[in-house]
Structure formats: structure tokens, C-alpha cells
Image (tube, grey):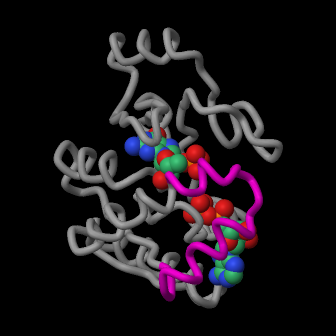
Amino acid sequence: MVSGPSGVGKGTVCKLILSRNDDIKLSVSATTRTPRTEDTEGVTYYFKSKPEFEKMIEDTAFLEWAVYNGNYYGTPVAAVEENLNNGISVILEIDAQGALDVKKKRPDAVLIFIAPPDKNTLFERLKGRGTEDDEEISKRIAAADWELSQMEKYDYTVVNDDLDTAVINIENIMKSEKEKM
Ligand code: ADP
Ligand code: 5GP
């Protein structure tokens, strides 16, 4: 599981890891948030209405789910299990509530926290991405402190300063954890 405050670079880091490793896949979450221009249905998320998402909760279709900034986000359990059964490692790019929830159910899951070099850099990246309006950015900045306070509960912390270094560090953690199994 990979977590970290919004704008820290989780998506960027994970995309690079996936492009370099055939035996690692990303879990595609379901969400009720509005798609951004760079989103693709079934690739970045499965976009659901609130009633559709609530039906999936009822059907126990999620390994975990959480509310983040007023929207539902959840990890469909079937795809995760199928990949793991086929020897494929799965990255869950989810918030700290969800990650800690999964760790309780699956203690073998590895928690990796992506931390910013400093808060200023984090906010600059979030604003620089240009995908949220000012109100949404303020909410995400407000949520960042809580996310950062969860860092000590994680198995590993990787600072995303230089992108390539962060990617290599996470790949090394995943390799050594797989060897332990
Ligand atoms: P998250 O998925 O954590 O919300 P993103 O992957 O969307 O964050 O990254 C937020 C912004 O920061 C993007 O514009 C991305 O290009 C930039 N970014 C990510 N990692 C780095 C890095 N190591 N150095 C500089 N900019 C980065
Ligand atoms: P975004 O709207 O920027 O794509 O994601 C907002 C937050 O939701 C991020 O912290 C992201 O990691 C988290 N998130 C994405 N998918 C899931 C999920 O399936 N479950 C949980 N708990 N959080 C998720």
C-alpha cells in the first residue's frame, strides 16, 4: 500500500514503477469523485454514483473503503485477490484510513508512506498540478497534516525528492518484501 498527502507524487511514482515492472499491477479503485481530464474509466478509477457505490459496500465488494473530502473511495477486492493468486504484486494507492484498515485484515500487506521533502514543496506540487480549484486545494492542504501524522504507523517512509530515487527505493522495498514471503 502506498499512501501520502495529496500532491506528494504517489500517482507519478506508481506510474513509473508499473511501466518498469511487468509483475506489479495497480489496484484500480472505485470512487464517487468527479473525473479529472486525465482520468480514464477503468484505468485510473471506476467512477460510480453514490447509490452504485453504496450497493457495492452492501455486497461486500470492497477490501476497504473510506470517505475522503466528501467522496467515497474503495478497493474492489476481487481483482486484488486474482492478481495475488497469480503471483502478481498489487499496489494499493490509498489514503491512510484505508491502508491501516487493510493492514488489520492482511498483516502481510506492506505499508509505504511517501513523504514530501517539506510542506512548502508539497503545496507547490499540489497547486502546480493544476487539477483542483482553490477550494479543493484548501481542503487537501487541510487534510495533509492528518495524513502526515500517520507516517509513523507505516512500515517504510520514502521521501519523494528526486523522482528516480524514490521509484528505485520503492522497487527495492517491494523486491525484498517479496523475497521474505
Ligand atoms: P499525488 O498522486 O500524490 O496526488 P501526483 O503524482 O499527481 O501526486 O503529483 C503532484 C504533482 O507533483 C504533479 O504535477 C507531478 O508531476 C509532480 N511531482 C511528482 N513527483 C515529483 C518530484 N519528485 N519532483 C518534482 N515534481 C514531482
Ligand atoms: P484523488 O482524488 O487525488 O485521486 O485521491 C484522493 C485520495 O484518495 C488519495 O489520498 C488517494 O490515495 C485516496 N484513494 C484513492 N483510492 C482509494 C481507495 O480505494 N481507498 C482509499 N481508502 N483511499 C483511496
- Magenta stretch, main secondary structure, is helix
Drawn side of residue 43 relative to residue 106, left or right: right
Counting from the top left corner in percent of width and height, residue 78 is at 44, 28
Residue depicted at x 24% and y 57%: 108
Q: Position of residue 135 (x, y in %)?
A: 60, 49
Magenta range: 116-139
45 displayed left or right of 130: left
| Residue at 27 percent of width and 46 percent of height | 102
Up/down of 129 relative to 52, above or below: below
Q: Between residues 60 and 71, which one lies in front from this camera angle?
A: 71
Nearer the observer, 94 or 80 = 94
Q: Residue at x 55, y 31 (%)?
A: 31
Between residue 39 and residue 28, name the one nearer to us. Answer: 39
Q: How many marks?
A: 0
Residue 18, image x, y percentages: 65, 62
Query: 49 and 91: which one is in front?
Result: 49
| Magenta residue check for 91 | no
Q: Which quadrant of the figure has residue 112?
A: bottom left
* 17 relative position to 2: left or right: right
For the N terminus, which image quadrant? bottom left
Q: Which quadrant is the C terminus positioned in?
A: bottom left
